[in-house]
Amino acid sequence: MAKIPRNFRLLEELEKGEKGIGDGSCSYGLEDGDDIMMSNWNGTIIGPGHTVHENRIYSLKIHCDQSYPDKPPTVQFLSRVNLPFVNQTDGKVDPNKLNVLAQWGKDSSIETVLVGIRREMGSFNNRKLPQPPEGTTF
Amino acid sequence: MALPKRIIKETERLVADPAPGITAAPHEDNLRYFDVTIQGPDGSPFQNGVFHLELFLPEEYPMSPPKVRFLTKIYHPNIDKLGRICLDILKDKWSPALQIRTVLLSIQALLSAPNPDDPLATDVAKHYKENEKDAQRVSREWTEKYASQ
Amino acid sequence: MFPSPRDLFPIFHCPLCPPDAVLAAPTTLRCGHTVCAVHVRATHCPIPGCSTQQQSSTHNTIAFFPAPPNTQSHPPDITHRALDVRVNSIIHILHAANTHDCPFPDPFGNSDGDSDADDPPSRHTTPQRHNADPTSPPDPHDFEKTLSTELTCEICFMLLYQPVTTPCQHTFCSKCLQRSLDHSMLCPLCRQEFPGFAYFQEHPHNKVILSLLLEAFPDAYSARGDAMEREVRDARLDTSIFICQLSFPGMPTLLHFFEPRYRLMLRRCLEKPCPTFGMIMPPRAAPIPGHGPNAGSEFGTMLEIRSVQMLADGRSMVETRGTHRFRLLEQDSLDGYLIGRVEKIDDYDDDLAEWAAQDDDRAPSSSNTTHVDIRPSPQISLTRITPRVSPPSSPASTTGTPQHLLSIPTLLEICHTFLDQLRAGTAPWVVQRLNYTYGPQPPDTDPGAFSFWMGMVLPIDEHEKAKLLPVKSARLRLRMVVGWIEQLNSNWWFTSGCTVV
């Protein structure tokens, strides 16, 4: 199998993100359009319906270092949110507590991370967790 | 998966008989991934610059074109901020009879002959169309700043 | 001993000129014959007895309908026959190499430049071309090298294998040209548009070039053929995998092959005596909690190809039928598509016998209980087209008998009840769908096949249905199916009777 190098892999992800993915409930793009190494990304998740997150818009930072995509990116919430895998002091996502990061594989991507987080928001255990006021940040 | 014979032959030829002003060497751990340098052609605003690029031969190569990108910042109407190149043979005009060598020669030619009518970097293209002399000045500045060795 | 130019000249004699006349301005016709351009006056080959009829070389029993000719494109222009670039260049090479022995001046001495306008850069470096000076002693190795360079395919960079020549007179390996056609209808060398996909099906080889290959490079040529065969035979990952949709054993599936990589996969499958391939579902967009990132695509179904209808542009409609399930043990990719090593999945042998026996013991009670409990409202509709006013008298449940104890006949009965209810209370197209889309309903005597058929029919998520694939017991599968039926029944009751929360 031809192994796609990091940079071309990230270019593919960027182009997919620019076209828009799925129903638009998750989106992502480069933090700085000049960043030739494509390391820092912004992500947005619209909270799933029928949960405490409904209609909330969550901003995240995603960092892909040189070992991407062999290793997962680091993910950090900018918007305040109460979820078991999010550090409540700085918003960092604990990779061991979030399935999409813990079981990182060759089909995983920035998109699968965002979609996976959104799915967790709607899971039975998390859908009713009390949340900080809307619009607050870490 | 073994590397197709064609890629091995192309690599051997690139190393043994490089095109003038162009180098290409495969990564040790990924023989489909090449480090490339292209010298700015004489007489162009990119003269005396050495530009770094990366090139990747996807699984379906040579049925699909190679993927190529500038790593050195360059002020050119057909190359965007992320180094992506607008060149027809890298897209719909690709043919399996083309090779890494012909692709890199075409990119070198693109440096000599920018095409602001088919832009990828629209602001640079606008600059080139409205005031070519001034745009070339910026291209020279960038070459000196980012592509001098 | 490499043949001398003199030995090779007879291959290049024009079949229509006086004996021993070498081809002048050679052009190669669709039938694979090469003649001097002056002889070509009509669409058919001027060689007496040449039949341009193509014979089919399919070695398998499936129904294959080749692509119809493209009626919109014009036949190649026969009034301006183009030069067979490669044959012409080879004649030059033979003449050049022959000048040393030949007392006559080389008649082609200065015409070199015309023919190589289309040559790849590699050929410009060939020594012989620039070295045709008769005073320098000819090196037989140079001649061999020049000839082998001239016989190199511009797509794979190897010695031509089964050479075919296009109407624009460019020659490629048959397989290389086919792959190029998957991607584009333009000639890789001159970008002239080809007359359509059908033109190249079963295309005869260029007879002159093939003869030269066999005469000058017999060992290298047969080695190429052997290598290709060996690659197929020794491949550990010998199953082609099509990532498309869910299928089960016994189910008919009609597939549309349009992506270049899958066209190639299909062509390779059809070269085998029994064309089959595996099909798996694409993975979900994001991993499911508790599963690996590839959840859902580890198990699939082998499909046997029943018929292939090729369209004029090279796409194909392929009729298949599921034969058995497999588990993907190892995978890699080949030219863009997935290949793998698979393990067949069969049901446990004792499964049916064991449960048939148990069934005798408990049949009366369990079957009665269930039958009563699960009887649904006749108004229930699969499509929710019919508005419903009252919920079923009793929501689905299997109180009394734990589900894991239900016997095969009981489970079958639940399924039949559900099917009856569908047929009775729904739009006619649903019934039609039941009858045609998934093939005939398997009889109760084959609960294994029935479990798959029933699972396929249910209007639930395909990834959920895929959970039937690894299960090796027909009874367990039926139990899963019944579980879904109960969920459906309770959902329908819920959504029709109450406001959705």
Image (tube, coloured by chain):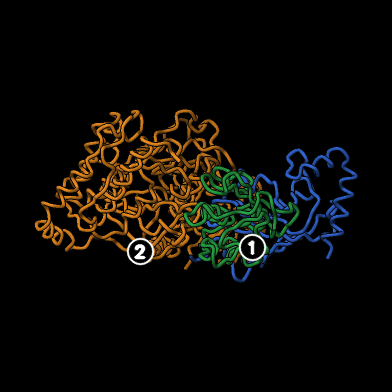
Chain colours: A green, B blue, C orange
Quick check: C9 left or right of C435?
right
Residue at far bottom of view: B28
Residue indicated by mark 2: C233
- Res B4 seen here: no
Q: Residue at x 51, y 51 (%)?
A: A122
Residue type highlighted by circle 1:
Gln
Rendered-image quadrant of the C terminus of chain C: top left
Mark drawn on residue A88: 1
Q: Position of residue A111 (x, y in %)?
A: 57, 53
Measured in 3D between alpha carbons, the distance from the residue under mark 1 to the one under mark 2, in whole angstroms, is: 58 Å
| Label 1: how many Cα within 10 Å (few below 14, some 14–19, many 20+) | some
| Label 2: how many Cα within 10 Å (few below 14, some 14–19, many 20+) | few
Q: Residue at x 47, y 54 (%)?
A: A124
Subunit ID for the residue under disc 1:
A
Number of marks present in the image shown: 2
Subunit ID for the residue under disc 2:
C
Residue type highlighted by circle 2:
Arg
